[in-house]
Image (tube, rainbow, N blue to C red):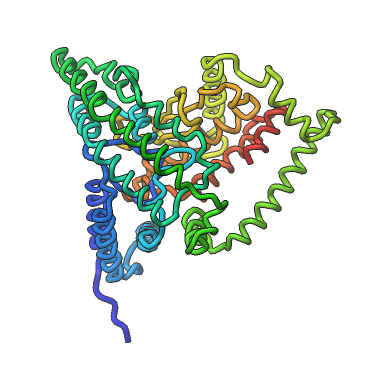
Amino acid sequence: MLIMPAASAETFQDILDDHWKRAVEEQVFFRGDPDAFRMNGKLAEVDAEARARRREFNETIIARLSLIDPRILDADERISYRVFQYERLTERESYSQYDHLFPITRLFGYHSYFAEAPAAMSFLESADYRNYLISLGDFPRYNREHIALLREAIALGYTHYCKSMEGYEATISAHIVEDAEESALYVPFRRFPAQIPLESRNMIRMAGKQRIESLIVPAFRELLEFFNNEYMPACRKTVGITSLQDGDRYYDYLVRYFTTTDMSPKEIHELGLAEVARIRGEMNAIIDDLQFTAGFRAFLDYLRNEPDFYARSVDELLRRAAYIAKTAEGELPRFFGTLPRGTYNIKANSGRGSFYMPSSGDGKTSGTYFVGTSNLNGQPLYTLEALTLHEGVPGHHLQTALAMELGLPEFRRTLYHSGYGEGWGLYSERLGKEMGFYEDPYSDFGRLTYE
């Protein structure tokens, strides 16, 4: 007969505390929302030694968890135990996979997250600037370690498909500026809180400018040279990660990681086909109701080319998004019994498009709904309702702000499961119909394009 060791709820809390303390030290939060990246002093180490260190620590946590009998925990703690154990076992599997070889993707990368982070950071006291200067100073090391990972990827053949990365160099070259004050990373030095003395401001500003000129810009040049001269010449010529050795195993892992289900890739593909057929049917019904007779493709061309479907300025786009967001806020009490206290901002983003960045959780920042403004013709007004409900409320902001305010363990406040997070965003788009949105059939068609 197996006798379970005696354990207490405090023992489980000790494990959670030890794990979170290490996560903060490492600046690596397993399965956190990558859009939530903010720098805070020294940046994470991503070399082989650091991964081995984190892997070993994760094994000690798994071993300590095995000594706890979850039956002695209360109902809420048992949920946390199950989620935490699931995360640690998933992290264990991740160390035998190829995730670390893809620090850049078509949509973003470690370098763009770094450059975009200050736009959603708080700079309220001198300590915030000191930590920021440390981060700027550490970027060359951080950059070199990521380049080393990409060289490892080249050696193993685990690079991106060539076509998918065409033009990606622009995300790097955008940060190679002649004048440091033109850098997105210089923005925090343009405005200081009143409590920082003028003399200190000048010193901080000079230090920031010097780091951008002597460290940041050269590091981006180094990355650009590597990407153009080494990575792209070695890009993958075959479509699909399963074309690589061990690619099937990696793809199966990715399905589990992003969905948390045991569905096979084939089952997911079949589900997708069925959903697309349903959505296409709903789209056709809208087209018929509009008495548009030229066909589906012609309707899409009409939407792309009709000027009335696009904002004429960044200001107009932001004002329309803000109106939708405020209207949605007013509808929330009809649908939700618990609402977050935390607020969110709406800002233009001239970089990689629209996304939501949650609050830092320390009371110093709000959530931020970034609206892509680099190409006004790339953000049609007929999708703006769906986009805003997805990114703001009742979408990502409602979801993440509540997670931060409900007294959950630290790891659950920042945990981001793509299947749940994006699933909630999709549900929020659809809930908009019950909230009174999509009265314009073109807007409802836009919702279906997002679905």
Q: Whole-percent x and y of residue 69?
A: 32, 70
Residue that appears at 54% across and 27% down: 330
Choose between 414 and 166: the one closer to the eye.
Answer: 166
Residue 106 in the image, given as x and y percentages of width and height: 49, 40
Image quadrant where residue 223 sits = top left
Q: Which residue lies furthest to the bottom in this view?
A: 1
Q: Is residue 68 above or below residue 374?
A: below
How many numbered discs sit on the rendered protein? Answer: 0
**In the image, farthest residue toward the top:** 198
Residue at 64 percent across and 30 percent down: it is 437
Quadrant for the C terminus in the image: top right
162 left or right of 71 in image? right
Q: Which of 137 and 434 is in front in this view?
A: 137
Q: Which of 178 and 237 is in front in this view?
A: 237
Q: Is residue 17 left or right of residue 33?
A: left
Write down the quadrant of residue 64 in the picture. bottom left
Q: Considering depth in this image, is 241 or 113 the residue closer to the camera? A: 241
How far across and down, in percent of the image, does residue 356 sit?
46, 34
> Which residue is drawn at the image coordinates 22% and 23% (left, top)?
208
Question: Measured from the top left, where is residue 195 in percent x and y?
Answer: 18, 17
